[in-house]
Amino acid sequence: MAKSELNIKVFLSNILNAVGAGVVVALLPNALLGEILKVFKESNQYLELIFQIVIAIQSFMAFIIGVLAAHQFKFSGPSAAMIGTAAMIGSGALQFTPKGLALKGIGDIINVIIVVIIACLLILLLSGRLGSLEMIILPVVIPVVAGFIGLTTLPYVSGITKALGAVIHSFTELNPLLMSILIAMAYSLLMVTPISVVAIATAISLTGLGSGAANLGIVAACVTFIWGSLRVNKAGVNIVLIIGAAKMMIPVYFKHLIIAVPLALNGIVAGLVAYFINVQGTPMSAGFGYTGLVGPINAFNRMEGDAFTNIILLVFGYFIIPFVSGFIIHQVCKRILPGYHDDIYKFEIPKQ
């Protein structure tokens, strides 16, 4: 991409598109296979190995986002490797321990975005200006400078997650119905942002009804984007959304913040469902929605009474009610909200 073609809007659009695609590439293998492998891997060493592989792929999300960002800018292969390396170092997923390096989680996506922006700017600033020294200087400057800045900003950026966690934790002190509605709304609105909803839940040890409400808030976000996407995106994008990987729509959400209205409305419905069915969960299940049936399984294990009745309730709570109400809310919003229509849900797939 020629530097003359770049402006702030195009630059940020390239970054956000890379984030959306990178989240899918990194998280989809575990979303599809993770829960199934957990059930069967204990007695099979090969399935255990596959499980470790999908977890590792997930942990390399920052690197993948960095490479895809370079691809968006049409940078060279070496530049892509440098940006990916810088993103990985600055993400927080790469832990420096006395015993060596270790992978932990997926890192902080907000910090990844910061590092990728810095690395891409450095490439744009220095590329073509160093002559024959470029292949010597850039591999030192880009990963080291951008990675160092990322590690420096990481504690402060992580504070955003902690601050949001404190707000959500304050909801747990309210009456159960209001708590469920507010947590479900918050999680619906936060799901399609760089904020890690799982990190929030684990940071504040969100359990019981609060976890269930958060879980259904994730479902609300997925449903919102499924109905918006169906008519304007190809089957592959819609299937990924149906699986539950709504975070891929970060660029869509940030470009069209009007989507926050149906997200909030679907969140209210999700909170009501969580309260009346008494959906419960754990800190780890809170941020998964129905992906891999993590939410429904955890809720089922905490329900009392007849198993068949509980399954019916969960089918209505996780699938029938959210999808029906999501469709109605989408249609109503199209009629009454200026600027709200199917086309705003168009997902731009990075070209090969």
Image (cartoon, helix red, strand yellow):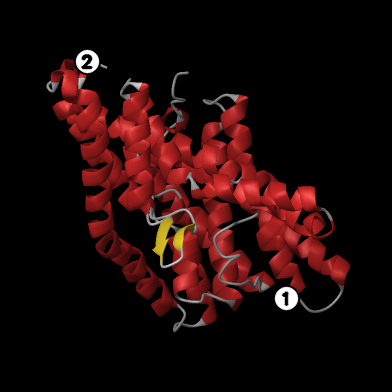
**Would you call the spot at circle 2 few (<14 residues within 10 Å), some (14-19), or many (20 or more)?**
few
In the displayed structure image, the side of residue 34 where residue 7 appears, left or right: left
Residue 17, visible in the rendered structure:
no
User: Percent position (x, y) of residue 240?
Assistant: 60, 37
Residue marked by disc 2: 2
Residue 28, visible in the rendered structure:
yes
User: Percent position (x, y) of residue 245?
Assistant: 56, 44
Q: Residue 36: give its label.
A: none
Specify the amino acid type for callout 1.
Answer: Arg
Q: Quadrant of the N terminus?
A: top left
31 relative to 139, above or below: below
87 relative to 139, above or below: below
Residue marked by disc 1: 302
The residue lying at 59 percent from left, 42 percent from top is: 28
Name which quarter of the figure residue 273 lies in: bottom right
Specify the amino acid type for callout 2.
Answer: Ala
User: Percent position (x, y) of residue 80?
Assistant: 36, 29
The residue lying at 36 percent from left, 75 percent from top is: 166
In the displayed structure image, the side of residue 236 where residue 190 appears, left or right: left
**Would you call the spot at circle 1 few (<14 residues within 10 Å), some (14-19), or many (20 or more)?**
some
**2 or 1: mark nearer the eye:** 2
Q: Secondary structure at mark 1?
A: loop
